Each structure stands twice: as structure tokens, then as C-alpha cells.
Amino acid sequence: MTHIIFDEQRIELEEGQTVLSALLERDHDIANSCRVGVCQSCLLQAVDGEVPESAQVGLKDTLKVQGYFLACSCKPETPLHVVKANDTDLYHSATVIEHELLGSDILRLRLKPEHMFEYRAGQFVTLWKTQSLGRSYSLASVAELDDSLELHIRRIPGGQLSNWLHDEVKVGNSLQLQSATGNCFYIPGSAEQKILLAGTGTGLAPLIGIARDALRQRHSGEIHLIHGTVQKEDLYLHQTLLDMAKQNEQFHYYANVLRLNEQQVPDNANSIIRSLPLEQQVTEIAVQPAEWKAYLCGDESIVNSLKKKLFISGFNMKNIYTDPFVISTDV
Amino acid sequence: MTSLYERIGGDAAVDAAVDIFYRKVLMDDRINEFFDGVDMEQQINKQKGFLTMVFGGPNNYTGKDMREGHKHLVARGLNDSHVDAVVELLGATLQELGVAAEDIQEVANLANSVRGDVLNK
């Protein structure tokens, strides 16, 4: 017999009892449906203790490493501290140490947190202007390589946070942020697998973090990064990416610009900048899609439609990681 | 005698079948409009639940779940022809995976047994 800790309460488990059944018995409101480990409705997170392997069958590997498990299939043998999914929020203060405009409307913020905290490159943090006004931004930095946090913030017309960050926040200011979350990050283990990173706009931020993290962890397979933008001027890290491709043989960079002025560059299969739609670019690169792993970040509708197209073209669903950026309607 | 679920290959068969089946569903113009705008991860988990059930595997779905889960689709015009299409794609998926014809028939029978609930008849 063992127990779980949930909502600051100690709950005893009967022999062979599942976490879900113990919580429901005590009237905790835990979403659930099939109760046989298939539908994943009853996803919870363990913040301390050992999760039985059988409680993680079928979960995405990025969820497994964060301690997520299915309550209906979880019969722990030792004490487990359990929280509802995404209920581990902690707040941090961080000082702005760099405030630089990249291109016309993207701000690069570098922040030095008071206490360094754990995150995985590609996850996002929420920045708070007031207690009730916050927005999430992806991390472009890599915890193991960089001593500050890097965020790329596009100015949204009428956006309350982005305009404030662009116009009023200055180097030396202190900001409140909420610890990193998100399931779009690199996992070591299949070092030879080919990786596709495709994103639009500031969807580049998590992707460049994931790419650097993969290289840091000695990923040996090819890494192909596609940055999709509306205009050529929006390729805000063009030179950085060209340099990365020059320095790392396995790293390939493509820029797909929707509105390409013919005088700007020749648009042929050999040029880095093309006006080819993202999905066609992907099809050209990923010839045997079942062998690939894909990370898609940026504009919500583009990410979702690309995900569908990739899946139909033969990518395995478990190998597609996405981070669709949702623009708050409450600008 | 082994059960249908064991003969097909249990969990592993569900995993192998789900991507193939869902891909067929999304490509099929007779039914894919019902899947527009849904969360694909959630949907694939639901498909796994469905496949487990029609393979004769362990599940706790009730007729009521089936009715509730498809009511909004019935309101959008879901009818027998769409269920026929799903059963057909299910058969094609299993054929691709080398499942025996009699077992495919049994799966189709199980799928058809929930037709009334799904269509809220």
C-alpha cells in the first residue's frame, strides 16, 4: 500500500487501486472517459515520485519526460506527488539585459532571471504586465548554452503586451514571468532521425532553440529548418541561420517568402530564398516522411493545416510536435 | 479459443492501425468535412478508443457515450452513408495490415452494432 499527494492532501491507495479511482472516490473533479488508458482524458502530472511505465503507454515522449501519466492506468508502488496537467506554475522575476529590434517589427528581449530555472529549448514562458494581463512567448535560448532567456516578440497591432514591451520596457526593467511549459522540444534518443523544423514569423524562436539544443546533444541526423514569412524583410535571423548552416554540415536552412519580388533573388531550387509554399518545400525535403520527426511553430492556422498535410503525406502523428501561436482576441 | 482482439494483435495492432485509418478518413471526401477543425491529437486518441472497441478489446464505452459523442455530427447531417464509409475504410486499413477476411467481417459487425447509437436512432 502506498499513497499519493494531491492538492496538498495525502490520499491512501488501496492495493491495486488506480490514481483515478482514488481521486474520484474523494470527489476530485478529474476528467476521464475510457478508463482503460486509451483516450488520454485523465492526463495528470507527477512532480515527485516514480511513475509506473504502464501509466505512460501511448503518450508522446515529450509528455513522458515531464512526468505526465494516465490516472486510470496508474497503480503506483511508491508515493507519488500528483498535480493536474499544467498546474505547476511558478513565478519568477527577470531583468531585461537586452532590448533590440530585429527587422521592422520583431523585438529581441534578453532576460536575466533572478534565479535560473529549468526549461527545455522550444518551451514558452508567460510574461505578465499586470496580475491579469499576460501573454506567452517562446524561448529561443537554450538553458545549457545561454546564461539569459531570449524571446522574440512581434508587434501585434493593438496588442497590449507586445506594444508595451516594444515601446515602454527598457534595459534594466524587471519583468514577471511564469515558468516554462509546452511540449515542443528536442528529446535525445534517436540521434540519427531526420528532423524537420518549420515555422512562420516568430515561430522561428522555438525552432532555432530546438535546433541548437539538438546540435548540443550531438544529434547526428540531418536537421532542416524552414522559415516562412510574408516578405523578405521578415527573415529576421537570415544571417544567423546561414552561419549555422555553414558551421554545421547537417544543418540546412530554407527561407520561404510568400511575396517575393522577382528582382530580389532568383527563385530556383538552388536558392535559399524561394516563394515556394511551405508544404511543397517540405515535400521536396522529406522524401520518406515516415522516417522524420517534425516540429511546427508559429501562426495557428498555418501550423494546424501543415500538421494535417504532413500527417496525410505519411509523417507519423507521434512524430509531429506543434506549437500553434494563438493571438489573444482581447488585444 | 483466442479472442478477436488477440487475433488481430491487441494494443500493437491498434497503434499500427490508427495512423493508417485516420489518414484514410482525412483523405476521404465523403466524410472528412466532419473532421475539419478538430484537434488531431485528441481525435487520434478517440480513434484509438474506437479501434480498440471494434477490435473487441477492453473498453468502457456505453451506448450513451456514443449518442452524446456524435449528436453534434448528426445535427450536421451524419447519416448511414457516412457510417458505411467509415466501415469501408476500417476494412481497407485491416486489409493493409494483413488481417484475415473473417476477422475483418467480425470487426465490421462490431462497428455496425453501434450504428444506431452513433446516429442517435
Image: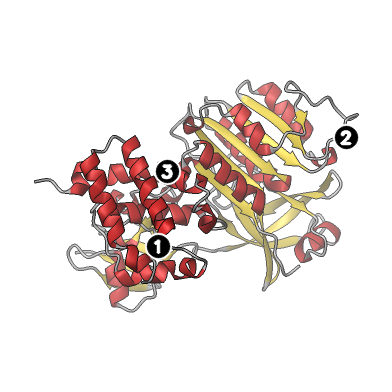
Question: Which residue corresponds to mark 3?
Answer: B19
Question: Which residue corresponds to mark 1?
Answer: A41
Mark 2 or 1, nearer chain start: 1
Q: Is residue A150 left or right of residue A48?
A: right
> Quarter of the image holding residue A42?
bottom left
Residue drawn at (64%, 45%) of the image: A206
Q: What element carries label 2?
A: loop
Q: Which of A98 and A71 is in front in this view?
A: A71
Q: Residues within 10 Å of mark 1 (few under 14, many from 20)?
A: some
Q: Nearer the viewer, residue B69 or A210?
A: B69
Q: Nearer the viewer, mark 2 or mark 1?
A: 2
Q: What element carries label 1?
A: loop
Amino acid on which disc 3 is placed: Asp
Chain under label 1? A
Amino acid on which disc 2 is placed: Asn
Where is the C terminus of chain B found, in terms of image quarters?
Answer: bottom left
Mark 2 → mark 1, Cα distance in angstroms? 48 Å
Residue drawn at (57%, 48%) of the image: A322
Residue drawn at (28%, 76%) of the image: A25
